[in-house]
Image (spheres, rainbow, N blue to C red):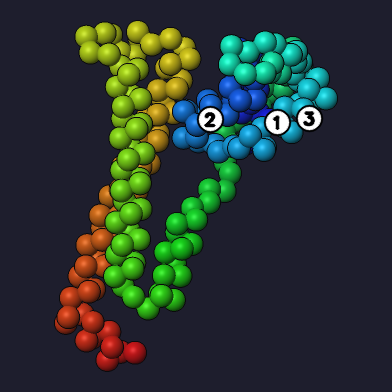
Amino acid sequence: MSLENILLGMLDKPASGYDLKTEFSEGARHFWAAELSQIYPTLKRMEQRGWLCSEVASSAKGPPRRVYRRTADGRKQLLEWLRSGPRMGTERFAYLAQLCFMHELGDLEQTLDFMIELRSRLADFLLLLKNAEAELTPAGEEFPESLSEVDFHGYLGIRMGIHSLTAKVAWCDEALERIRKRQSPQVVRSAARKA
């Protein structure tokens, strides 16, 4: 999956680079991260390819801004990407790499603190997705029939995130239990004898 395809999908309505960054911060960050320093050069490149066109528009706040629109060629590229089947990328979890090397600190208490903080962050993100799900599924309405096409497909993505984060929080709970068990005096003495 590339940032170009994500931006093509997001540009179903005209938007500035700043608007797109805001949308990443509020929604798309659940599956893709991008900074303004990546977005602007990518938009320019996409415009050069003919996938976007832009114009300068006045802004209610601040200086004029460049607003991008998806072209027919851009829509064609988006549809080709959507029809190409599921794209599986290599997920990178920096926190797992950190965890693998925590033994270098020689302090299980720091590993415990690390896992407590990680669990807290994952749980916060899970709560954010559950709140987003609740906004899409108001009580008393037929579900999922009442959702628009855009909301229904967004809902499916939110549900995947909820399942994934629920599993990660459960893994944190298991890891915390094992770390605390390992910290018990009897386990520490046993490990010292084996070393």
The structure residue drawn at horizontal position 28% and vertical position 88%, both measured from the top left corner, is 192
Q: CA distance from mark 1 to mark 3?
A: 9 Å
Q: Quadrant of the N terminus?
A: top right
Which of the numbered marks, if any, corresponds to residue 45? 3
Query: Label 1: few (<14), some or many (≥20) within 10 Å?
Result: some
* Left or right for 61, reference 149: right
The structure residue drawn at horizontal position 74% and vertical position 33%, both measured from the top left corner, is 41
The three-letter amino acid code for the residue at tag 1 is Tyr
- Does label 1 or label 2 sit earlier along the sequence? 2
Q: CA distance from mark 1 to mark 2?
A: 13 Å
Give the SS element for disc 1: helix
Of 91 and 176, which appears nearest the observer?
A: 176
User: Can you give x and y, in whole percent of width and height, for residue 30 in the image?
Assistant: 46, 35
Which of the numbered marks, if any, corresponds to residue 40? 1
Q: Quadrant of the C terminus?
A: bottom left
Give the SS element for disc 3: helix
Q: Is residue 12 visible?
A: no
Q: CA distance from mark 2 to mark 3?
A: 19 Å
Q: Look at mark 2 in the image and give the residue it sits on.
A: 24
The structure residue drawn at horizontal position 27% and vertical position 91%, both measured from the top left corner, is 193
The three-letter amino acid code for the residue at tag 2 is Phe
Give yes or no for contact between labels 1 and 2 (Cβ–Cβ under 8 Å).
Answer: no
* Left or right for 15, reference 167: right
- Does label 2 or label 3 sit earlier along the sequence? 2
Query: Label 2: few (<14), some or many (≥20) within 10 Å?
Result: many
Height in image: 108 above or below 136? below
The structure residue drawn at horizontal position 34% and vertical position 32%, both measured from the top left corner, is 128
Q: Nearer the viewer, mark 1 or mark 3?
A: 1
